[in-house]
Image: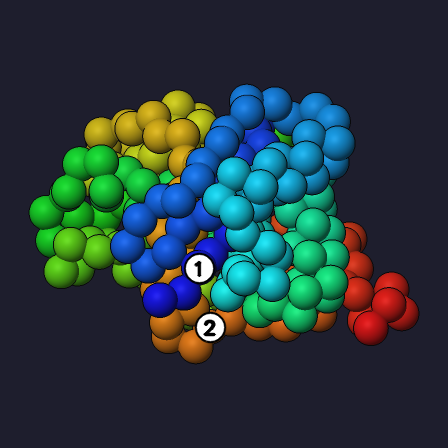
Amino acid sequence: MAIFMAFDTVFGQCSVAICDDEQVLYQQTLPTDRGQTEVILPMIEAALSATGLSLSAIDCLAFNRGPGAFSGIRINTAVVQALSVAAQLPCVGVSSLAVLADTAQQAASYADGSRIVALIDARQNQLYAGQFIIQDGKINAINEDNNPHGNEYLLDYGEQVAADVIVGDGGELVRADAQRVSIHPTAVDIARQAVGIYQQGGATTAAQALPVYLRDNAWKTLTEQGKV
């Protein structure tokens, strides 16, 4: 049974969870998007202390790799890289858009064939968007041809969106005949997504724990920084 430590600083919060394949062992979420570096590190220490685990007892680190708030993604990436290097742990980066869609599905269990579009306000009159369809009760990405980011893309404010369900803080910024859902994922939801990715061999090293901004590639990997 694998043990996961998950954290999120992208959804306007600091959230930490420790889970195994079947249950949540610890979770804490603080709603803040300021001073996250100073907040998240003591939260990680508190999580390990509360569960009686050392970092070396963790099997995989899971983090929100974006897209979303630039500073939140940068902090998430820096933390996971540092912990991964320190304890030689594999990492799983989870899409913020997939987490929104999956958390909505967990809450409502939409019928197979339902189309969920996750939208995050990217400012500058644009949204981060991801398309998903429910199959066998689970979300599956709808990938666009010639899109290097698969099902993730930038969408302008006011665009028409074809969906059955829209989730995320950008839902009111598009035109759609769809149910709009308010969902607030935490690190527990990050961990749930990471379990499947990990079991399918999708874990990476610290050097490959990469953020997804969609808009730019400003954050450097450890290799580019000359640290590994």
The residue wearing badge 2 is 202
Can you name the residue that lies furthest to the left here? Answer: 111
On residue 139, which mark appears?
A: none
Local SS, label 1 = strand
Give coordinates of residue 177: x percent, y percent. 22, 31
Give coordinates of residue 14: x percent, y percent. 58, 32
Q: What kind of residue is marked 1? A: Ile
Q: What residue do we see at 22% from left, 56% from top?
A: 138
Question: Is residue 224 at least partly visible in the picture?
Answer: no
Distance (Cα) linking label 2 and label 1: 15 Å
Describe residue 223's horizontal placement relative to residue 169 as left or right: right
- Position of the N terminus, as image quadrant, is bottom left
On residue 3, which mark appears?
A: 1
Local SS, label 2 = loop
Question: Is residue 134 at least partly visible in the picture?
Answer: yes
Q: What residue do we see at 51% from left, 71% from top?
A: 203
Q: Nearer the viewer, residue 15 or 87?
A: 87
Few, some or many residues within 10 Å of mark 2 (<14, 14–19, 20+): some
Describe residue 36's horizontal placement relative to residue 126 as left or right: right
Q: How many marks?
A: 2
Closer to the N terminus: mark 2 or mark 1? Answer: 1
Q: What residue do we see at 23% from left, 42% from top?
A: 106
Q: What residue do we see at 41% from left, 65% from top?
A: 2
- Position of the C terminus, as image quadrant, is bottom right
Give coordinates of residue 211: x percent, y percent. 64, 56
Q: Nearer the viewer, residue 185 or 113?
A: 185
Residue 3 position by quadrant: bottom left
In the rendered structure, are the residues bearing label 2 and label 1 in contact, judged by CB atoms less than 8 Å apart?
no
